[in-house]
Image (tube, grey):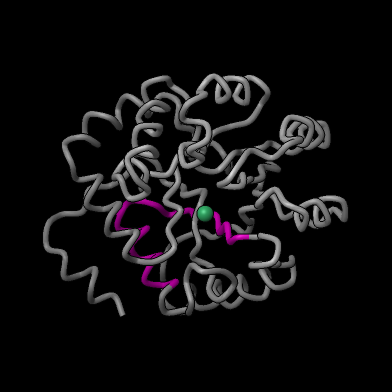
């Protein structure tokens, strides 16, 4: 099952933290992992990079992935059993990546959200435009005790010409989770430039793999072996708080 990974012969470079807060490893609930076997392969890759705590943040999106607490929990329990059977020493936490849309509004109103331990919620903007009432929603969630994390802000290209907005959102209490894949250029040059801007400006609160498949893991593994990461990672390690999110 893990042959592809074991074939990599050089020593695997580890990340400087042990908690991945953004992943699509939960099987069969979105366009990430499609089977228990794929999930185990991805978790093995996480372990190779030094990650031993993974928050499972499957998509919850109107029309496409209208997951419920029940659908996610069902898959989570099956994966936990499989991880135990496989003998992988990795802790799993169930949450989700919530697109801020009409389905989210319903789930939020019904108090159906699944936060991380510590009441963190990973939120995703539309890729077309910012949510019209984003500030109001962030404020409302914070009043209710949620700690809001904006997933991969560097990927919303409508911000790249108005980066002051990032500062406003940060000052308003939104925390930022940047994808390591964005540094590699995987999501295009604009996202890469923005990711580097976040790094230079000390605005990366969390890093995430946002891993949907084992190919993503391999791209991250290659990148963290690069000279660029070697130089960048000590600079951003001061602001990255992945391991503090779960006590
Ligand atoms: Fe994601």
Q: Residue visible at 60% across and 60% down?
A: 59
- Magenta segment: does it hold 162? no
Left or right side of 225 for 49: right
Q: Quadrant of the N terminus?
A: bottom left
**x, y percentage for residue 108?**
81, 51
Does residue 242 appear to the left or right of 106 in the view shown?
left
Q: Residue reaching furthest left?
A: 9
Q: Return the residue nearer the eye: 225 or 53.
A: 225
Q: Residue at x 63, y 30 (%)?
A: 174
User: Residue 216 location, x and y as percent?
Assistant: 34, 59
Which residue is found at the position 31% from the left and 53% from the top? 49
Height in image: 90 above or below 189?
Answer: below
Q: Tell me how many marks there are.
A: 0
In percent of width and height, residue 220 lies at: 30, 51
Q: In this view, does 173 lie above or below 67?
A: above
Which of 152 and 237 lies nearest the eye of the viewer? 152
The residue lying at 55 percent from left, 59 percent from top is: 56
* Residue 54 within the segment the image draws in magenta: yes
Q: Which residue is more in the foreground, 114 or 133? A: 133
Q: What stretch is highlighted in magenta?
A: 39-59
User: Farthest right residue?
Assistant: 110
What percent of the width, then of the height, locates residue 167?
56, 20
Image quadrant in which you'd find residue 169: top right
On screen, 189 above or below 33?
Answer: above
Q: Nearer the viewer, residue 239 or 129?
A: 129
Viewport quadrant of the C terminus: top right
């Amino acid at each position: 099952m893990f042959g592809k990974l074991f074939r990599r012969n050089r020593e695997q470079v580890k990340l400087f933290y042990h908690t991945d807060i953004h992943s699509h490893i939960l099987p069969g609930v979105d366009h990430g992992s499609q089977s228990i076997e794929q999930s185990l392969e991805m978790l093995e890759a996480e372990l190779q990079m030094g990650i031993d705590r993974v928050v499972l943040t499957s998509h919850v999106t109107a029309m496409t992935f209208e997951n419920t607490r029940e659908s996610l929990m069902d898959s989570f329990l099956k994966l936990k059993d499989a991880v135990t059977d496989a003998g992988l020493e990795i802790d799993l936490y169930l949450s989700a990546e919530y697109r801020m849309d009409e389905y989210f509004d319903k789930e939020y109103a019904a108090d159906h959200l699944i936060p991380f331990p510590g009441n963190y919620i990973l939120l995703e903007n539309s890729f077309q435009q910012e949510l019209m009432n984003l500030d109001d929603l962030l404020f409302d969630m914070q009043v209710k005790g949620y700690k809001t994390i904006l997933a991969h802000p560097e990927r919303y290209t409508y911000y790249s010409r108005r980066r002051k907005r990032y500062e406003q959102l940060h000052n308003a209490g939104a925390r930022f989770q940047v994808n390591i894949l964005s540094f590699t250029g995987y999501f295009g040059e604009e996202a890469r430039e923005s990711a580097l801007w976040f790094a230079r400006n000390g605005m990366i609160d969390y890093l995430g793999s946002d891993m949907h498949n084992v190919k993503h893991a391999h791209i991250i593994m290659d990148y963290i072996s690069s000279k660029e990461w070697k130089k960048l990672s000590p600079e951003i390690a001061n602001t990255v708080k992945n391991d503090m999110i779960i006590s």
